[in-house]
Amino acid sequence: MTETTAANGAALLVFALLPFLPGCAATNDLRAVAYERLSFGEIEQAYDLMQAAVRENPDDLALQEQLAELRTVYYLRSGQEKVFADDDWAAVEDFERVLLADPGNTVAQRWKDKALRKLAERATHAGDDARARGRLEEALERYHEAETYVAGFEPAVLGAQRVREVFEWRRKKGHENYLLGMRAQASGLYDQTEYHMQLALEHDPSLNAAKERSLIARRRMAERQLEHARTAEERGLYETALRQYREVLDQFPDLTPDLVTKVAAMQREANAARKLEEATLLMKRGDFARARPLLEEAYELSLAQRSKISQQLVALREADLDQRYTVALDLELDYHYEEALRAYQAIDAAWPGQLDVRTRIQNLETALEYAREAQARGEKAEAAGDLEGAISAYREALTYVPKFGDLAERIAKLRDELRVKSAEKAGSGASEPSSNDSKDNASGAENTGSGK
């Protein structure tokens, strides 16, 4: 028979006598229902009913004894169920209630010990897991917790011993690295100093001397990095300077009073350098329109690179001028004088007096003026029906401006009209004699007649 069955059997024996015990009818009714609930194994309901019965008849000592017996059974059953559900600490509390009323209850004591052992095992497993993950302080806490449940719990004792061994090993390694870092610092090897001091602190966080020496080493390294940043700035390596100034500022903002100003200045210079680089690439592609605003923005941003940017602006101007001059000249050579004139005028407006632009403007303006005058004479002659004169005037205009408007088409059209008229005139002369011929024929006839 198990301990649980024995406890239930004791309760049933107590309640078997309930109907024969003295008491009022209501109390007996509650006893009867409680007995019935207990017979079905419903201990909690039976316990509640017995408590109600005692409240109705508080002077009934026998009834109180029966309630005490049922309380023992109730808490034993409750504690056992909690053990099976791994709610071990709540189970311990139930068993302690039993032992408080009945210190010699061996069943409650054994189950309490079982629940405490489970708690100790669980805490030890948590300690082992924490130790495996390197969380030694947490592991040691869990092992100590296990020993509060079961004094001298061997797995917890062994686990704690291993943690202390690791702590001791770490302490030694921390001290060894501290000595190595101290020697490196004496030689001015601050990188190695910082490396060993960090290892020392990793092994033994309580080494305050390592913290102090680490701070000194990092400050010396920051001072060197500040010098590197200044050198990079002097060489025009603004991205590098910016990065190094920022790193120094993040670690030791008080290292020099102008760090914040330096970071801001290097940010502007780095931005300007990027814009300058982008503009230079655009210039190589001949995209001067997009390059110019970038150079102007870079000039506004920068103080240190203004001379270089100014030179690039001059180069941009010269390259843009050459490109636009070449376009205008090609238009002129291809006899597109009006377009060429506009191109030259745009150049002169942007860069007054450059190259021979004004001379070419003057020559084109003169040629166009003469061409317009000749065109006007041609149009006047054409309107008067003087096709030959119109053609002559239009041809004169084309000598000044070879591709002037639609004069070439007009000349071709007028020539066609002249040919048509010439053909018509020739046809008319062949079909009808002239008046002079008629007179000559008549005179000849008279002469012939008189000769006869």
Image (cartoon, grey):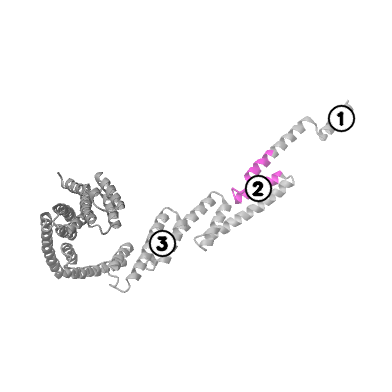
Q: Which residue is mark 1?
A: 447
Q: Point out residue 430 in the picture as x, y percentages from the top left corner.
A: 76, 31
Rendered residue at 30%/68% (across/down): 249
Nearer-the-camera pick, 236 or 261: 261
Q: Residues within 10 Å of mark 1 (few under 14, many from 20)?
A: few
Q: CA distance from mark 1 to mark 3?
A: 103 Å
Quarter of the picture containing the C terminus is top right
Position of 263 compared to 368: left or right?
Answer: left
Q: Is 81 above or below relative to 306?
A: above
Q: Which residue is mark 3?
A: 312
Q: Which mark is residue 394?
A: 2
Rendered residue at 73%/47% (across/down): 383
Q: CA distance from mark 1 to mark 2?
A: 54 Å
Tell me, yes or no, if residue 235 can be seen here.
no
Q: Point out residue 57 in the picture as x, y percentages from the top left corner.
A: 28, 57
Q: Which residues are magenta?
A: 387-416
